[in-house]
Structure formats: C-alpha cells, structure tokens
Image: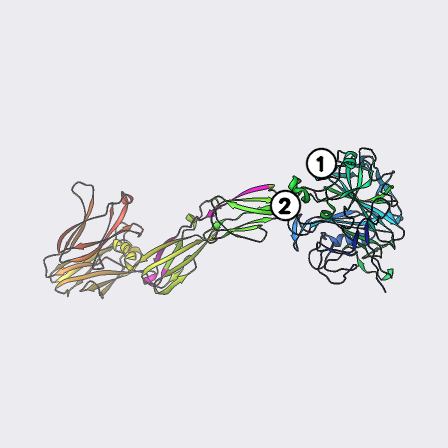
C-alpha cells in the first residue's frame, strides 16, 4: 500500500496563481500537528510520520487541545443514532502556557446531520452568499448534498512561544459526510458578536459596516483596527486543497491603501459597493503562510485516521470511530507572516492583547466560487473573545504553628500573568507562573493580572493576610490521694481558653505535662506518684498552635495547712508530764488519731493512738486528751496524725512544749496600733529561719515570704495586698521548715 498526501496552496478567487506561495504539505507548526489526524504526539500524514511529540485536537497522552469531558455521554448518544449538535471548549483556560506555547483559545463543533431520513436543523434556506449582510441570511431545517454536510469542525489559536509578540498561528479542521466530488467550505471569523437564533432562523451581527467590522489602516498601510476575516477552502479529491484568506475592508481602503505587510487581491466581493472581502496576497510571492493536508490513503478501506472520542459520521453514512479517507482537512496559518497579527503594529498603537475575534462561523458552499450559494452551517461558536481575569483567590492565615503562609490563585476561564507587591508584608518566594506566593509576615498583598506578559493589567486585587496568635489559658490544680499515695493533677483551662477571636473560638486543647522524677503526660488530668517539686503544663490551642505555660511548685506544705487549721492541738508541761489536748473540726469523718513526738522537730515517732469512738454532738467537736509521762528535758515537739474513714491521712500543726524550761513558744495574730495593718506576734526560745505563707481558704498559696525569727519577741508584719482585703485567709508560719503556727483570720 502506498500513502499519498495532498498539498495546500493559497489562491485568490477561482484560480491558483503561480505567483502565490504554496503552503507546506503538512507538518508540525508551533508544536501543533497539521497531519490529517486528530491525535497528539502522533503524526499520520506529512513529511515526517510516526510517534513525534506534538499537540493535536485529542490525546491519550499529554494535553489535548479540545476538552473531552462527558465524552462517554456523547459517545452513547451518537453511536445510538441520535442527531445532535454540541460544542466543546479548549481543555485548559484561555492563554494557558503549555509546552512553551501560549494557547489563546480553541473550540470544537459537532453539527446536525441530514443523511436521509435525518434533517439538519442548521441549513441556509434561502440564497445566501459570502459578502452579504448576515442579517439577510435565513437558516432552518433542510437537506444538503453529502459533500456539503458538515460533521466536525475545529479551530485553535496559539502563539509560537509564551510572549504576546511571538508568531500567531491559526489552526482549523473540517470533516464532511461526503468524500466524493469537490467540497467547498469557509471559516469566517467575526470581530464583534455574531449569533444565530434557531427559533426564528435569523442571524445577528454587532458589526456596523454592512453587518461586518472593517479593517482600517493608516496612510502608511499599517493596521489600526482589526476586523472580520474569512478563510475560504476549496478541496477536490486528487488535487491539493487551496485556501483564500480574505479580510473585510471598505471600498475606500481597497482603492487607496497599500498594506505594509501584504497586498490586496484584484477584487472586492460584497453585497454593497461600500464594503466587501478582499484577498490577502504575499508581497514577495514566495512566503509560506503555513501548511495544510487531508487524510488520504491509496487504499481507502485501510485508512485508520482517528476521529473524536465520541466518534463521527463516516462517508458510509454510519457512525464510526475513524474518519474514512479524504474526510478530514486540516490547515495551519501563520497570521504573523500573513501580516494580520496585531503584535506587528504594537509600536504604532495597535494593542496585541486585544481580542482579535469574538465568534467563528463554519459553513459550506455549493461551488468553488467565493460568492456561490452557501449550504450547511454550524451555529456560530464563541472564539477568541476578550479574556476575563476571573481567577479565584485563596488567602491564608499565619499562626503560631504556621510561620509561612501562601496566597493561591486558581485560574478559571483564563490563565493569566500575575505580578505581586506588598506594602507591609514580606514575600519569600513564588511558583513558576506566580499563581502562588509564599510569605512570612502579616500584611497587605496586591496582585495585578493580565492575560499574558506584555499586556497591561486588567484586574487588581488586595489580600490582607492576618496572624492568629491568640493563646489558650493554662492552669494547674492538684490534690493528693489517701496517705499521700498518689498525686492527682488537673490541667486547664478549657472554659477560659474558649473565648471569641476573629478566627473563632477554641478548636480544642492539647496538654503536655512535665515534672519531678522525669514525669510526663499528654492527658488533661494525669495521676502520678507523690513527688514534690515543680510541675509544668504547656497547653496548646489546636486552632493555631499557640501555647500558654503554667508552672506550680508543690510540697507537703501545700496539703497540710488546711488540716492544721482543722485540728487544733495544744500542750502544757505540768507534774513532770506534758498534757496534749486537741479538737478536730472534721471529727465526723475521722477514724483515729496517732500522737507523734520529735525531739528535733524533724524526725517523729509514734507515742500512741486514740480511736475516734466519741461521736460529736453536732454543735462542737469533742476534745481528745493524751499525756506524755516521759517528756525530754527541754523542747518536745508534737503533732497529730489523723486518718479518716477512707484512709486519707492529714497532720496537725506541730507544737513545741518545753519541759523544765520557763519560756514557752507563743504565736498570735494581732492588729497594729492604728488598726490599719495586721502582724504575727512570735515569742520563741531561740533563733529560727522562718517562712511566712498566706493561703486562701481553699488552700491556694497566695503569698510567701522568708523571715528571720530571733530568740524572744518578734512582730512580723503581714504583707499588704489589695486583693487580700476583706477576705478569709490562713496565716501559716514554718520554723526551720516545720509548721509551727496556722490560723484562719479575716484580713
């Protein structure tokens, strides 16, 4: 089997003048395959064939130009015989940068079929010609010959690079049902809005120049305004397809202007004398405008040209997955080389970023004459309208646990070019297309966007990045178990941490405990062995990772003051013995009282035990008595060890009784002479290192101060504190680290 390819020539009117340059016989232009096939990374016809890296309309590997979403739905409908029309847009946002090329826009259209007994709903029903005012055309339901019955149409515009001044390429493709006989079709591009209303069969154009928009030039032949353009294609099997590129101009322009980059053809075709389409000719006659080709196999039955993901109408008038030979024609035109690229005239004021066209219109003709009657058409498709910078912004929040934040842009219909600045923040980096920036400082960030580099910004947004450093509230509370057997810690504060902020309330807390003997825990209320020392709790707010730290030293002192306040112990030396008397305010819960004695105030031993066999009368606690008949000469220290019914042990304050000495220790709380202060009166037998501790009635340590107690009378002023005024407190005095006095008082 031998494969043959059909070339493409540029002609004007009816004749292929030899002075016009011939288009290349297929090829890869701006990385797009013009090869009579629709698959990316594969070239079927042309100078080179096979697996060659390239873009195309559809792809199983890489990025397809046309969106293929819902392909299975269309496949099911079309293969089942449905006669439907639909269109698909470009697979990526407008102005996307893919494989180093700038994809401006793309569109695909599937037309109704009129293969008997089907009826095409988009047929010209009256004589309609190129050059007419479109408002005079009429569309509706009818039939046309197979060779004029359009099936699939394609269009794509890109630049051969990522800059707005890189070469501008236009790619198009058309398939028809019939493959026998000559076929003629046009691709007309409208500068301003162009539409069709199916219910009335009427066309509407926003062009003000006989239903079109004219191209304008200055005196030097430079384009100052772009307008409508048409690409007329004549294709005859066995001969190369030819293309006639025309633009809409006024008769004045046609007769007086010599374009700077091209020449006008010899005729102006329009329904009125004032405007019409004129062919574009190369000034040199040797400049290649692009390439074109059709799928052709010498053995038609062996042509395996892939069509679309949803299939097509074959020339056999049945649905299929492949184009039959000669069904598809593809064309690629270099609009920059032709001379109609606005970027060529940007130095003269023409904006290369402007919308070159707004709609594209595919239609078939009855003959090779440019003004022959038009037959079938595809409803006008939106193409190359002004890109809208409709991106979405996703801001961020800096937090204690998020030192670096991002601002992200999501492209919607247009992939833009973005520049960033900040008035008081700090940008630390960005990704390759600046759709994401990294930052490490709260503040105001400004993004300016345009469709592509070299174009002015068309949208500016301001994003304020806040910082969430609202901390939780940490606190520590502890109790001891029976006989100091364990230490129960309570962490918080959940309620105090759940306060309202601009970022909402608390989303939960994490606890991190540490303490003596290597103690650690991550639960809120842990239990540990009784180990005296400083406990630390770091509370973390889950919402922002911010922390608060509480530290609390604990010793046995913190858990004996209330007991000493509850058990009042006194002693007196008489008759060579020391009589001990005590009362317990918590007598109802006590099981027994053990009397302990020490000669140095530190090491205690048991003297005996008194059972709580006497039930209190409910009005006042009972008095308990015990006599030490063998006191030591000098100082004797005593304390009561009370054990409750649950086994919890508490101790009374330590008292000192002198046996054989005349001086007895005495402590009492007194008011100052002027009544404005409170002091602790102490009369002791020797010098002591003292510690004065003020507790709340619930046992919380409020104030601590170290005092030196000398032998004899001492008056220790209690600390003046506004927060203690008019409150009930417990005053405790420790001498040489032993509790010697504790009394409740109103401060």
The answer to whether 96 appears left or right of 583 in the picture is: right
Instruction: Please say if 239 is above or below 144.
Output: below
Which residue is disc 1 drawn over?
A: 219
The answer to whether residue 80 is magenta is no
The answer to which of 340 and 107 lies nearer the viewer is 340
Q: Position of residue 287 (x, y in %)?
A: 76, 50
Quarter assignment of residue 297: bottom right
Q: Position of residue 603 (x, y in %)?
A: 22, 65
Residue stretch rendered in magenta on the structure:
459-487
Inspect this view and state whether residue 569 appears: no
The answer to which of 740 and 638 lies nearer the viewer is 740
Instruction: Please say if 25 is above or below 260.
Output: below
Count of all numbered marks drawn on residues in the image: 2
The answer to whether 638 appears left or right of 31 in the picture is: left
Inspect this view and state whether residue 384 appears: yes
Is disc 1 placed on a helix, strand or loop?
Answer: loop
Q: Position of residue 676 (x, y in %)?
A: 20, 41
Quarter assignment of residue 142: top right
The answer to whether 490 appears left or right of 124 in the picture is: left
Q: Quadrant of the C terminus?
A: top left
Is disc 2 surrounded by few (<14), some (14 to 19) or many (20+) residues within 10 Å?
many
Label 2 and label 1: CA atoms lie apart by 31 Å
Is disc 1 surrounded by few (<14), some (14 to 19) or many (20+) residues within 10 Å?
few
Which residue is disc 2 drawn over?
A: 451
Q: Which disc is residue 246 wearing? A: none
The answer to which of 23 and 120 lies nearer the viewer is 23
Q: Nearer the viewer, mark 2 or mark 1?
A: 1
Q: Position of residue 55 (x, y in %)?
A: 71, 56
Of the two numbered discs 2 and 1 on the same chain, state the one appearing first in sequence.
1
The answer to whether residue 464 is magenta is yes
Is disc 2 placed on a helix, strand or loop?
Answer: loop
């Amino acid at each position: 089997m031998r494969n043959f390819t059909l070339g493409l020539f540029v002609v004007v009117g009816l004749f292929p003048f030899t002075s016009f340059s011939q288009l290349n016989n297929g090829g890869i232009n701006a990385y797009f395959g013009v090869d009579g096939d629709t698959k990316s990374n594969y070239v079927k016809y042309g100078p080179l064939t096979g697996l060659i890296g390239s873009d195309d309309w559809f792809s199983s590997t890489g990025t397809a130009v046309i969106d293929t979403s819902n392909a299975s739905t269309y496949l099911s409908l079309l293969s089942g015989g449905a006669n439907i029309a639909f269109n698909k847009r470009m697979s990526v946002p407008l102005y996307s940068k893919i494989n180093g090329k700038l994809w401006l826009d793309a569109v695909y259209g599937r037309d109704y079929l009129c293969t008997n007994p089907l009826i095409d709903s988009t047929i010209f029903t009256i004589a309609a010609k190129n050059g007419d005012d479109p408002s005079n055309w009429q569309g509706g339901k009818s039939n046309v010959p197979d060779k004029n019955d359009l099936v699939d149409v394609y269009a794509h515009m890109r630049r051969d690079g990522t800059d707005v001044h890189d070469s501008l390429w236009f790619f198009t493709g058309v398939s028809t049902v019939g493959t026998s006989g000559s076929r003629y079709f046009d691709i007309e591009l409208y500068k301003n809005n162009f539409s069709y209303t199916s219910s009335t069969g009427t066309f509407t154009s926003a062009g003000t120049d006989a239903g079109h928009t004219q191209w304008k030039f200055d005196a030097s032949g430079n384009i100052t305004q772009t307008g409508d353009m048409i690409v007329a294609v004549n294709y005859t099997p066995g001969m190369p397809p030819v293309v006639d590129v025309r633009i809409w101009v006024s008769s004045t322009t046609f007769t007086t202007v010599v374009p700077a980059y091209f020449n006008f053809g010899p005729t102006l075709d329009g329904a009125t004398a004032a405007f019409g389409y004129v062919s574009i000719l190369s000034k040199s006659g040797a400049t290649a405008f692009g390439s074109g080709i059709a799928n052709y196999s010498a053995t038609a039955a062996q042509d395996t040209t892939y069509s679309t993901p949803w299939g097509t109408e074959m020339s056999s008038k049945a649905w299929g997955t492949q184009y039959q030979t000669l069904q598809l024609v593809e064309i690629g035109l270099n609009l920059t080389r032709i001379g109609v690229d606005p970027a060529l005239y940007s130095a003269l004021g023409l904006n290369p970023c402007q919308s070159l066209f707004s709609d594209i219109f595919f239609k078939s003709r009855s003959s090779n004459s440019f003004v022959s009657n038009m037959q079938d058409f595809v409803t006008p498709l939106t193409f190359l309208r002004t890109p809208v910078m409709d991106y979405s912004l996703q801001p961020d929040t800096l937090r204690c646990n998020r030192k670096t934040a991002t601002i992200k842009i999501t492209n919607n219909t247009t992939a833009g070019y973005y520049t960033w600045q900040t008035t008081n923040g700090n940008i630390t980096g960005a990704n390759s297309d600046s759709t994401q920036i990294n930052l490490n400082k709260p503040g105001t960030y400004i993004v300016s966007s345009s469709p592509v580099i070299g174009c002015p910004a068309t949208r500016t947004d301001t994003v304020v990045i806040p910082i969430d450093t609202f901390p939780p509230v940490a606190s520590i509370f502890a109790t001891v178990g029976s006989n100091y057997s364990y230490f129960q810690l309570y962490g918080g504060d959940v309620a105090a941490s759940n306060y309202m902020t601009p970022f909402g309330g608390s989303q939960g807390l994490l606890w991190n405990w540490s303490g003596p003997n290597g103690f650690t825990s991550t639960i809120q209320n842990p239990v540990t062995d009784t180990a005296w020392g400083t406990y630390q709790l770091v509370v973390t707010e889950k919402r922002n990772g911010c922390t608060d730290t509480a530290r609390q030293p604990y010793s046995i002192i913190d858990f004996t003051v209330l007991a000493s306040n509850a058990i009042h112990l006194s002693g007196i030396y008489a008759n060579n013995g020391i009589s001990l008397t005590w009362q317990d305010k918590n007598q109802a819960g006590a099981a027994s009282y053990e009397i302990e004695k020490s000669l140095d105030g530190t090491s205690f031993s048991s003297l005996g035990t008194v059972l709580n066999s006497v039930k209190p009368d409910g009005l006042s606690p009972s008095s308990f008595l015990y006599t030490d008949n063998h006191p030591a000469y000098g100082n004797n220290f005593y304390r009561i060890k009370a054990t409750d019914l649950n086994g919890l042990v508490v101790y009374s304050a330590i008292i000192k009784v002198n046996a054989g000495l005349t001086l007895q220790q005495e402590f009492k709380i007194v008011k100052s002479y002027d009544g404005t202060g409170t002091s602790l009166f102490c009369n002791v037998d020797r010098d002591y290192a003292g510690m004065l501790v003020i507790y709340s009635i619930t046992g919380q340590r409020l104030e601590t101060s170290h005092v030196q107690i000398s032998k004899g009378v001492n008056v220790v002023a209690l600390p003046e504190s506004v927060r203690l005024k008019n409150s009930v407190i417990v005053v405790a005095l420790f001498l040489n680290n032993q509790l010697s006095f504790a009394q409740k008082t109103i401060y």
